[in-house]
Amino acid sequence: MDLDALAFGAHADDVEITCGATIIKLGSLGYKTGVVTLTRGEMGTRGTPEIRAEEFKKSAEIMGLAVHKMLDFPDGRVEVTWENKLKIIAEIRAYKPKIIFAPYWVERHPDHENTSHLVRESAYLSGLKKIDTGQNAIRPRRVVFYQSRFEFTPSFVVDTSGFHDRKMSAIMAYASQFHRPDRAGSHPGSEETSLNRPEFLDNIEVRDRKYGLQIGAKYGEPFLIREALKVDDPVALFGPESQWTIP
């Protein structure tokens, strides 16, 4: 299946937390979207790989994904190797996405940082015909980086005002990971983590409102691209009216 947009994450729930509303919005616009997670989350404090896989499926249904796939990279050991690049290249060539979403390369979790490097390098390498995976070579138009813990100055912010609630529903599909008073004690592992404290969800709300405010919207999600964008018509790009109301 050919996709318009394919998002990669190191773990199930990474994409939902960071750019879930944008992926949902793209689906609502008629684009085919997908999410590939590199690991099964077996090193996570809470939940099990089987539980995480079921939650990933539920989240994908909420997000309206055309494709959701969980690879078998070892959790906690996502490494930038040629073997791993070939695995990512195979996914890119299988789905032929026009654009790819990847985590920002500055991160606290080494799996997230290495996922960023793997996806960026593989997106380029997937266009080289002499790399043989038994598939046709294909190079996405752009790799777009999403923000997690560390901020960057965005290249652009997507207005996600009409899709924030579905994003939060997709996040809450991961009942083993996030604060759910109605599910207390019903999952393997009861240790507290930074994810399952109530304020973690509050922080997502605050962040999305912050970036929405920057573009004159209720909610927004920030993105970074490394290359300059070609613009033929700046007037058309910025729209017929200012986003701000002048008093």
Image (spheres, helix red, strand yellow):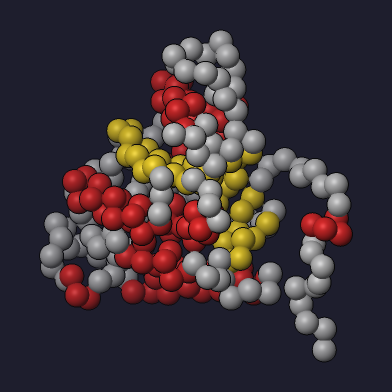
Quadrant of the rendering where the N terminus is positioned: top left
Could you say where residue 56 lies in the image, as x and y percent from the top left?
Answer: 30, 51
Residue for point 49% across, 35% down? 2
173 or 235, nearer to the observer: 235
15 or 139, nearer to the observer: 139
Could you say where residue 134 lies in the image, as x and y percent from the top left?
Answer: 44, 14
Residue for point 76% across, 44% down? 229
Image height of 6 relative to 89, above or below: below
Could you say where residue 47 lies in the image, as x and y percent from the top left?
Answer: 20, 54
152 or 132, nearer to the observer: 132
Image height of 140 relative to 61, above or below: above
Residue 228 visible within the image? yes
Quadrant of the rendering where the C terminus is positioned: bottom right
Left or right? Give the position of 227 relative to 34: right
Residue 23 visible within the image? no
Could you say where residue 44 lies in the image, as x and y percent from the top left?
Answer: 26, 50
Residue for point 59% across, 22% down? 127
Quadrant of residue 189 in the image? bottom left
